Amino acid sequence: MLVSEAVGRALVACGVDHVFGVVGSGNFHVTNAMVAAGARFVATRHEGGAATAADGYARVCGRPAAITVHQGCGFTNSLTGVAEAAKSRTPLVLIAPESVEPRSNFYVDQEAMARSVGAVPHRVTSPSEAVAQTVAAVAEAVHGRRTVVLNLPLHVQEQDVPDGALDAVALPPAPSPVVPSPQDVERLADALRAAQRPVFVVGRGGRTHAARDAVRELADRSGALLATSAVAKGLFHDHPWQLDVSGGFSSPLTAELVQGADLIVGWGCALNMWTMRHGRLIADGATVVQVDDTADALGAHRELTFGVLGDVAATAAAATDLLGERRTAYRRPEVGERLDKELRWRDVPYDDTGGDGRIDPRTLSVALDDLLPAERVVSVDSGNFMGYPSMFLGVPDEEGFCFTQAFQSIGLGLATAIGAALARPDRLPVAALGDGGALMAAAELDTVARLGLPMLVVVYDDEAYGAEVHHFGPGGHDVGIVRFPETDIAAIGRGYGFEAVTVRTVEDLAPVRDWLASDTSGPMLVHAKVTSEEPSWWLEEAFRGH
């Protein structure tokens, strides 16, 4: 058996069941070996799309995925998606055939490039070690929550592995969760006993079912209100004392209640500039605590009153055991009444700016929220528009929202939605894109259509890179370089095999209603001509952070 086949089969034996990519000469055999071993191969039209689709798949289903690319140029094409996944600590393995001859047209320093975007490089160095090195790469991806680049030199691929190399291949067991010290748990319990207005903010590190349930139980015992970072939106969707997302997407009531907290506890959450609005959501004198199982994460983004090094689920359970009797704290009747009436963005009054052939993006999003089934998975691209689907489209749980925004790149949303759709085929996939990101990633419309995904693609089209228009325009700068002529994006969708409609008013959404009432066996594209007068206050945070 060749190394290429052994590596492919070992990846599947370690639990990798989906591989996304673009196949060329260097990755042909290893990809076919994965398929022969039972993995599903998803061909995308660009390696960047493959990386991001794999990222979306792994985030939503909670299992590792693989990316397969050609050596050199295929690898470099994937790097923006790899950077996003690495920054988000998504468990992925990128299979990167490698030319080690500097005179080759395909030669680049793949190890250095992987490190430069935050991925962890591994390499298969010999036939005798190939399977063990592959297992080690998957183990680091899964147990270390890392994006791993497995370099596979071309000359090594063509060699034979020893007989029995694949016998008993399996992923090693996960290491034991980090147990918090008794002193840290007691300190946390003391802070909760003293707090009158505690707020919990749960991030990526608290998205497991065990962590969610343990944090929820502690919140119920301590009287805390429950918020999330954007990537964990939906985690407490059915809880009467949840605040939805803390940060740039916060509704006015959420921002008010977080600012009113005398204790903020971040659970697997960085409490970064997005989630805390550069610290403006933290009241003077508030106690700020961060719980994380990675020591380097504690206090990385802001000064803490104290940090707790420990697994989120284990720490929350230990604090619950110590806390004692149930407290009311922030869960007062008047707060509950306001949450019922004011929490959702759609309940916040606004002046509709639609007209003259343009629809207000808020009105569009509310109408879509009413039309679409509750069982949905929403994926959002980056750009001036991104707050509207994020704020106005409800989701059933944390697996209903896929948010690839750690690198702030536009153009990732469509591929994100492909991965999310494959991870949750029981739900309607919704891709919310701006015109810039949609046109940047248009090749993956072919992937959606070819896979027969019943996806709704919504393009919020303001014919510009709107973030730059609203950031630089008020200063008197010429923004002509970030404006574009009208493009018939609906026609582009039809060309790829989508049903498509151009939407200028709510009434124009009637074809979407008809599509939903059908068997939705194919995709639908909504080309929404949205008003462009409304600046995105959430992206003001982005420019502050540059």
Image (cartoon, grey):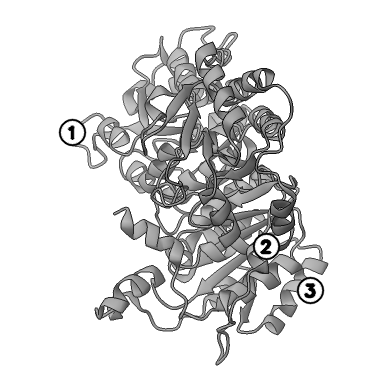
Which marked residue is nearer to the observer: mark 3 or mark 2? 2
State the quadrant of the C terminus.
bottom left
Residue 412 in the figure: left or right of residue 522: left
Q: Which residue matches tag 3?
A: 514
From the top left corner, tell me how far across and down residue 339 is, in percent: 70, 56
Q: Which residue matches tag 1?
A: 102
Res 463 → quadrant: bottom left
Report the number of numbered marks: 3
Residue shown at the point (39%, 57%) measured from the top left: 541
From the top left corner, tell me how far across and down residue 73 is, in percent: 32, 45
Tell whether label 3 touches label 1 (CB within 8 Å). no
Residue 342 in the figure: left or right of residue 151: right
Q: Which residue matches tag 2?
A: 342
Classify mark 1: helix, strand or loop.
loop
Three-letter code, disc 1: Pro
Structural distance between the alpha carbons of marks 1 and 2 = 62 Å
Disc on the earlier residue, 1 or 2: 1
Q: Residue furthest left?
A: 103
Which residue is nearer to you in this view: 399 or 311? 311
